[in-house]
Image (tube, grey):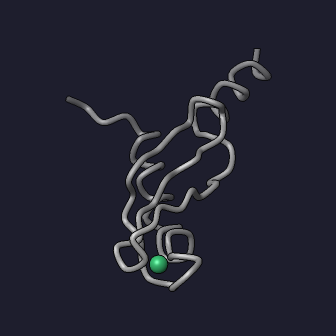
Amino acid sequence: MKVPSWLRLRRRRKAASTACATTCPTCGREMELEDKDTSSGVDMRTYRCDYCRKSHVVDHGTALWKVLSDARESGE
Ligand SMILES: [Zn+2]
């Protein structure tokens, strides 16, 4: 299966933001991605901190599909 170019772009952006965006606000350790919800148009991701044994919801801004959708609408 051919991977679309936008998927590769998203992966690269995710990797670049991982270092600063997914550290635990309590202990500063790296968290693991547990869940992701973009249904509301906002990229909300739930990360789990193994050290604190807590889950933290991180707001990653506008979801990619919303950005693409808005761009498509304004382009027509
Ligand atoms: Zn923690």
Residue drawn where x is 59% and y is 58% of the image: 58
Residue 51 in the image: above or below residue 56? below
User: Percent x, y for residue 15?
Assistant: 43, 65
* Along the viewing direction, whichever of 30 and 13 lies nearer the viewer: 30
Compared across the picture, whether 18 is left or right of 72 comes to left
Which residue is situated farthest in the right direction here?
Answer: 74
User: Percent x, y for residue 40?
Assistant: 65, 31
Which residue is situated farthest in the front direction here?
Answer: 53
* Along the viewing direction, whichever of 40 and 63 lies nearer the viewer: 40
User: Percent x, y for residue 46?
Assistant: 49, 54
Compared across the picture, whether 66 is left or right of 28 comes to right
Compared across the picture, whether 4 is left or right of 68 comes to left
Q: Which of the image's four quarters has the C terminus?
A: top right
Residue drawn where x is 50% and y is 76% of the image: 23
User: Percent x, y for residue 22?
Assistant: 50, 69
Residue drawn where x is 41% and y is 71% of the image: 49
Dividing the picture into quadrants, the one containing residue 39 is: top right
Dividing the picture into quadrants, the one containing residue 38 is: top right
Residue drawn where x is 20% and y is 29% of the image: 1
Residue 28 in the image: above or below residue 62? below
* Along the viewing direction, whichever of 34 and 63 lies nearer the viewer: 34
Residue 72 in the image: above or below residue 59? above
Which residue is situated farthest in the top direction here?
Answer: 76
**How many discs appear?**
0
